Amino acid sequence: MIELIEDKVIEEEEEQDYASMFKDCLVDLDKELAPIEPIVHVGFDYKGNKVAALTRFECSCIYAPSKAKKSFAKSLIEAAYIGGNTSNYTGHFVGTNREDRYIISLDTEQGEFYAQRSFRRVGEMVGRKYEKYLPIQLRKKSVNDRLNLIRWLIYESPYKGKIDLITIDGLADLVANTNDIVTSAELAEEIMKWTAEGLHVCFILHKNNGSQKARGHIGTVSTIKAETLISIDNITDDAGNILEKNTVKISCSHSRGMPFEDFYLTVNEQGLPFTHTEQRDNVFKNKDEIKEVREKEILPNISAEDAFGENDIAF
């Protein structure tokens, strides 16, 4: 039986049309290509310019220790893409929403109650319901069912060809064993195929305890593929004790383009995240207090009038 299977594999490989594959993969150096198309800008570079961190045909990774506001950062990215009132919260995340495109937000970790609360957070920041925001809770499904649903959404569903952004919280739940190098590599390769459909995939991973590396083989092989690694860390003392419960630091661990400067994310008393440049001791209660701080802080290349105009529209 094993010999027959091996023979079949060899026969299939011999039938490949490598001449056509070669032509398909050969890069035409004279062809004028369109510049990279940002999906969401993250932060500012050292000159104060927005950084195109999440672009079409690529993937990115948010990784952090447990309970370090990873899901809040994902919510900010999704809200920034949509726009609306999010300039009150997402000063360091700026989207490029097109009204005919979809966001698919996948949660593999949380039960229905907490997943819904996380998804609703996006609408609260935007200030309206966005019909093309598709929140999907996958914890109750098997690994194979989760993957097959994603494949259906990308290749067969009514949303085929209309998806700009897929977020996955968390990627480790798309493999049965995060330390299986073969299945981890296969998933990383498949993510690259998904992005070839003209979309961006942003996934969340956990960091190893006491390390700046993503957990497991799935963390190693998938972060290698990412155009941008968004690192989130708690603010601690030298002994590792957390000093600020509601605030974390966001850094760029890797970027194929220009990296962004560090900034901070704080969750206010309403459970909504917002970003700021300087570390602060106090937690702001509402968007008016956040707005007042931003106007004093003056984010690079964005005036208070631009960020908080009459309509509070970011785009």
Image (cartoon, rainbow, N blue to C red):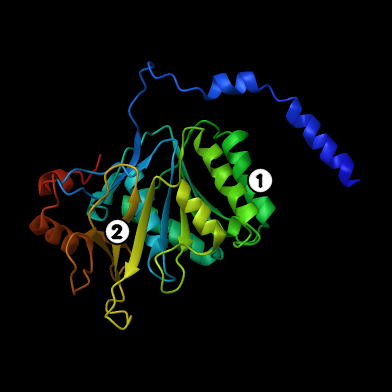
Residue that sits furthest to the right in the current view: 1
Q: Which mark is residue 251?
A: 2
Q: Amino acid at mark 1?
A: Asn
Measuring 42% from the left and 32% from the top, which residue is drawn there?
100
Residue found 33% across the figure and 45% down from its top: 53
Q: Which residue is mark 1?
A: 148
Visible residue check, residue 170: no
Please report whichever mark, 1 or 2, sits nearer to the chain's N-terminal start: 1
The three-letter code of the residue at mark 2 reads: Ser
Instruction: Give the mark toward the camera: 1 or 2.
Output: 2
Q: Which image quadrant for residue 295?
A: bottom left
Q: Quick one: 72 or 41, which is closer to the camera?
A: 41
Label 1 CA crowd tier, 10 Å (few <14, some 14–19, many 20+): few
Residue 209 vertical placement versus 76 (above, below): below
How far across and how far down the image is residue 195, in percent?
50, 38
In three-dimensional space, the C-alpha distance between marks 1 and 2, rounded to whole angstroms, equals: 33 Å
Badge 2 marks a residue whose secondary structure is strand
Viewed as shown, does residue 150 lie left or right of 309? right
Q: Is residue 212 above or below residue 103?
A: below
